[in-house]
Amino acid sequence: MFAIIGYLRSLFIQAAEGDIGSVYSYESIFPSQNAVFSVIASIAGGILVSRVIYNIYFSPLSKYPGSIIDKALEISLVYRFISGPIPLHFLKQHQKYGQYVRVGPNQISIDNIEDCKKILKSHRFTKTMIHNVRVFGEQNTFTTNDPEVNKVRRRLMKPAYTTTHVAKMENAILEAGPMSYKRKIDEAIQNSKDKSSGGVATINYIDWFHYMAFDVIGELAFGQSFDMLQRGDYMMLDGIKAMSVIGIFEIFMPNLSKLKKLVVPWLVKDVDRLMSFAKSVISKRIEQTMLNGGKAVRQDTLQVFIDAVDAEAGKGMNAKQATAELALQLFAGTDTASNTLSWTMFLLMVYPEVYDKVCKEIRATYPDRSKPITYTDGLSKLPYLEAVLYESMRFLPTTAASLTRLVPSSGVELSNGQFLPGGTEVFIPIYSIQHNEKLWKNHHVFNPERFMVNEFNSTEDVETRKKNLFAFSSGVRICPGRNLARCEMFMTLANLLRDYDFWLPEDMPYGPDVIEKKTGQPKIIPAFFGITYSPKNPKKNGWICVKHHNFTSV
Ligand code: HEM
């Protein structure tokens, strides 16, 4: 119909332009180039308009509320992703439209704990968005949407993530993490021109947490610290940045990704360099193990991967797959932990009452600063520190993005009785869930007391709240590295907060008294949302003053 209208329109334009006498001429029977273009444009326009009308009024999802533009066009969702932090957009949408919001023609965002748990609990709801991303040359545990591949890989790597294994690695984490961070602070204080109060240094804590997280993963998964914290930088960052860009490219333009060598050759080169480094690390360790009579030279994550490669044919990973999994460790285990540490430190700076309370708890429990605080010993003795970490991961989850899943062909019934047909893409909006006022009273306030058992909260309340956090996801694809991340973050904060005093520099546009009008709460560094949700512009916003804590004053 639209094509016919387009053709008639082209004839009309010719006539209106004075060509009326030639209606039966050659040009009118074989339309000009202009007219052919007009016909094509009309067909395309027709298809688009009918699709928009279908999406808004006739789709099985049309009963779900949402903005008209999001319901109508897929491109709107892409625009939301690139135009600003999408977690905040989803929060606003849920506050306006309720628990179930149509955020795209085929996408429903669900801010309902029970439904989200039900969806994440089953492999029947496969991953979307990042499926087929082969940025590491192979699919890996994180990107695969094949439940069988995921189950096998998780089983093979499980020994690297258990509490027992993490406890064994505690000293290595401590040394590559907080102890190294402390050495770096001490050096900065020693070199500082400000000699007041025994020396004051101004450091970029965000960059340093970032480097430290790489060193920890280097120590565990690559058998050596990358020494990024001490060096201040490392070429490996280029590889990781290149992986992020290519990853996004592969998500949104999977068909064009084959052309990446032509379009972004320098990024492909950076990724290749990182992959050959990972490959060489694996072959070196295999060689060392063989020289050691087949016995493990070191019980770390890398060794678990090597053993998985050695597993019986058909059950283990081949070297290419193990390399991809190793590279994934860098990707999944660095930015996530370092951003969480950065947000936590920042929050402590703008909520001084929380900072004082947590420092008091740590210093009173561990007054001997010559002994490092470990996770195995500290976890049960420092409940407020644990609560601070939980609340920070609720308030500013670095994985604020929505997890996405595909509804299986049988569809799913939601807890409100409504039905989602098979093929619908479901969004689990972590940030919105963790800022849902019905679940988290005064959600806009950073308040670790939510996770403390006291006269207001029973043990059961606190346990339920912990289970209602989605920062590490939930269900069958819950983050397997969570024990490791918790151990690293806990030990870092415990040791730094005990041994030093921190405060924001005076010229920083943030502080306990810099209040956001809308919330009445301290202003937060704007977030940058790439793969993770991180404090924007660390080169400008990442500064903090530090000095040795004077223990005689406590
Ligand atoms: C604070 C730190 C961390 C946070 C907040 C975090 C969060 C998450 C989340 C939300 C997922 C699910 C993603 C999805 O379903 O799309 C995930 C998956 C994953 N994480 Fe973490 N993570 C952290 C640290 C780590 C560490 C240290 C490692 C390992 C060294 C790790 C390894 C993984 C892997 C392999 C997956 C894929 C699991 C699967 O799909 O089956 N993570 N993480």
Image (cartoon, rainbow, N blue to C red):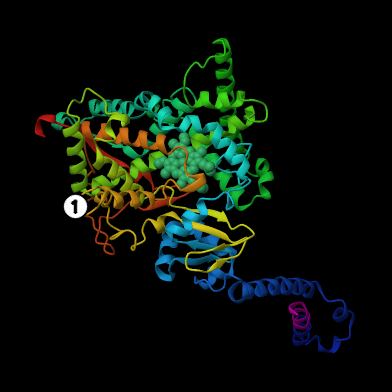
Quick check: 421 left or right of 379? right
Name the quadrant containing residue 113: bottom left
Residue 4 forms part of the magenta stretch: yes
Tally of numbered discs: 1
User: Where does the image place residue 12, in percent across and percent down from the top left?
Assistant: 76, 85
Q: Nearer the viewer, residue 423 or 52?
A: 423
Q: Which residue is mark 1?
A: 455
Residue at 38 percent across and 53 percent down: it is: 468
Q: Nearer the viewer, residue 202 or 321?
A: 321
Relative to 503, is 85 on the left or the right?
right
Q: Amino acid at mark 1?
A: Glu
Q: Which residue is depicted at the point 59% across and 20% down?
A: 283
Image coordinates for residue 18, horizontal then vertical, percent:
78, 87
Query: How crowded is the residue under tag 1: few (<14 C-alpha within 10 Å), some, or many (20+)?
Result: few
Q: Quadrant of the C terminus?
A: top left
The chief SS type of the magenta part is helix
Residue 143 x, y percent position in the rendering = 58, 44
Range drawn in magenta: 1-9
In this picture, is 49 found above or below 121?
below
Q: Nearer the viewer, residue 395 or 161?
A: 161
